[in-house]
Image (tube, rainbow, N blue to C red):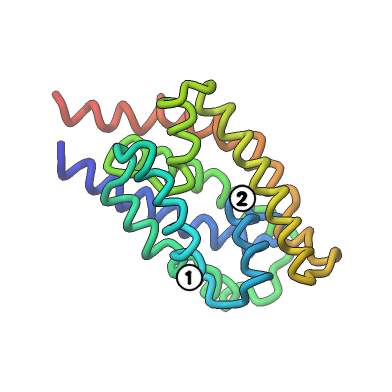
Amino acid sequence: MKSRKILMSICGVMIGAVSVGFFKLAALGVDPFQTFMCGINQMIPISFGTLYVIVNAVLLLFALIFDRHYIGIATFINLFLLGYVVEFTHQTLLGIFPDASLMIRITSLVFGFVALCFGSSVYMTADLGVSTYDAVALIMANKWKLGKFKYIRIATDAVCVVLGITLFLLGDGKISAIPTFVGLGTILAASSMGPLIDFFNRKVSIPFLEKAKK
């Protein structure tokens, strides 16, 4: 059981990281948290991987204060590796598809979205820690009882999108560049990510974990 949970945690985080690389290749809008990261990165132009560690370290404090249950191996894999895996995946895909057609970009977007939701479901179900961003919505839903996770996730995603755009513009970003990180993919993730994660939890992740108990 323990080994299966560890495997789920590692695989889930890595799948999620690779999926963001596909989002970036699509250039049709990234997921809400990455939109927030794009905004911060415009104001603080350092390596995305390093900036990701810094921002998530701040969010880690939130989880440590309000509910340490969500902090575990997956949290630290996410914290220290995800940003760099995203960078590597994106650069590799750009090398393979230097001038990606619209069809390739749309396919990349769909694949990235489904993979992101699946990866999130896998490592969240393993219950060995979640990303610091996921922890925020989970704490609001399960500890503060503010509502169902899938609805709270939609709300936190919307906040990230608004903050991301605002910070990007404050960092002298061009309005014409906004559609590359806020677009169809962002709307899709903000409106459907919570429900799709919930679907994968019920249909795939939880049944897979329960098999280990038999």
Q: Earlier in the sequence, mark 1 or mark 2?
A: 2
Q: In the displayed structure, would residue 32 be above or below residue 102? A: above
Residue at the outermost front position: 65
Q: Position of residue 189 (x, y in %)?
A: 63, 42
Which residue is labeled 2 in the image? 31
Question: Within 10 Å of the Cα at label 2, are there few (<14), some (14-19), or many (20+) other Cα atoms?
Answer: many
* Residue visible at 15% across and 26% down in the picture: 213
Task: Please report contact status of discs 1 and 2: CB closer than 8 Å, yes or no.
Answer: no
The amino acid sitting under disc 2 is Asp
Give the image location of residue 140, x and y in percent.
Answer: 48, 30
Which residue is found at the position 34% from the left and 35% from the top? 125
Which type of secondary structure does the marked residue at label 1 adopt? helix
Front one among 31 and 101: 31
In the image, 87 versus 169, the foreground residue is: 169
Q: Dividing the picture into quarters, in which one does residue 172 lie?
A: bottom right
When asked about the image quadrant of residue 78, the answer is bottom left
Q: Return the residue at label 1.
A: 49
- Badge 1: how crowded within 10 Å, few (<14), some, or many (20+)? some
